[in-house]
Amino acid sequence: MDFITSEEKTLLEQKLTELRAMDKVLIQRIAEARALGDLRENAEYHASREDKAMNDAKIKEIEERLVRAQVADSSALPQDMVFVGAVVRLKDEDRGDDDLYRLVGQATGRFDLDYVEVTTTSPMGVALMKARIGETIRVDLPRGEKRFTIVAIEM
């Protein structure tokens, strides 16, 4: 099961609406390119069909994700437990410094945030899920094991 926040669900639904609108534009482009003549040597036709196929694949991916996803409701959880959507302050046990991490269903890819996004399926995300304040978690990374202490849940 794929846990996502309610804002992630809203973003996925908005993206799906945009892609469906783009689908209509692509169908029109294909029709216009088809009217140009010989389809064997019609680059515009082939490019339009390829664009439509890629758009259809993205639509299918988002639809499947929305079907599989469960919106995380953290209201029933204890306030000291990490769950999807939580921003957590972690202390790196090796270096002694601390940073903010947010547990998300899918990373936005933005780097201008005050925290690092961690997906629920990543090694760090798996270790964080349902951990509590004060616990030390072990994360098995490609370069070896790291330990973090959960200092606080910020949001």
Image (tube, helix red, strand yellow):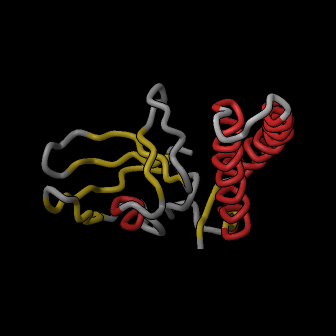
Quarter that holds the N terminus: bottom right
Instruction: Point out the residue furthest to the top here.
Output: 112
User: Residue placed at 73% from the left, 68% from the top?
Assistant: 67
Q: Tell which of 129 and 41 is nearer to you.
A: 41
User: Residue placed at 79% from the left, 37% from the top?
Assistant: 30
What percent of the width, then of the height, locates residue 37? 79, 32
Q: 108 above or below 75?
A: above
Query: Based on the displayed image, in which of its 4 quarters is residue 49 positioned?
Result: top right
What percent of the width, then of the height, locates residue 146? 19, 58
Q: Tell which of 6 and 53 is nearer to you.
A: 53
What percent of the width, then of the height, locates residue 149? 29, 56
Quarter that holds the C terminus: top right
Q: Tell which of 19 and 89 is nearer to you.
A: 19
What percent of the width, then of the height, locates residue 120? 48, 61
Q: 115 above or below 3?
A: above
Q: How many marks?
A: 0
Left or right placement of residue 107 versus residue 38 in this view: left
User: Residue placed at 76% from the left, 47% from the top?
Assistant: 16
User: Residue placed at 49% from the left, 61% from the top?
Assistant: 82
Left or right placement of residue 130 versus residue 122 in this view: right
Left or right placement of residue 126 versus residue 36 in this view: left
Q: Tell which of 35 and 77 is nearer to you.
A: 35
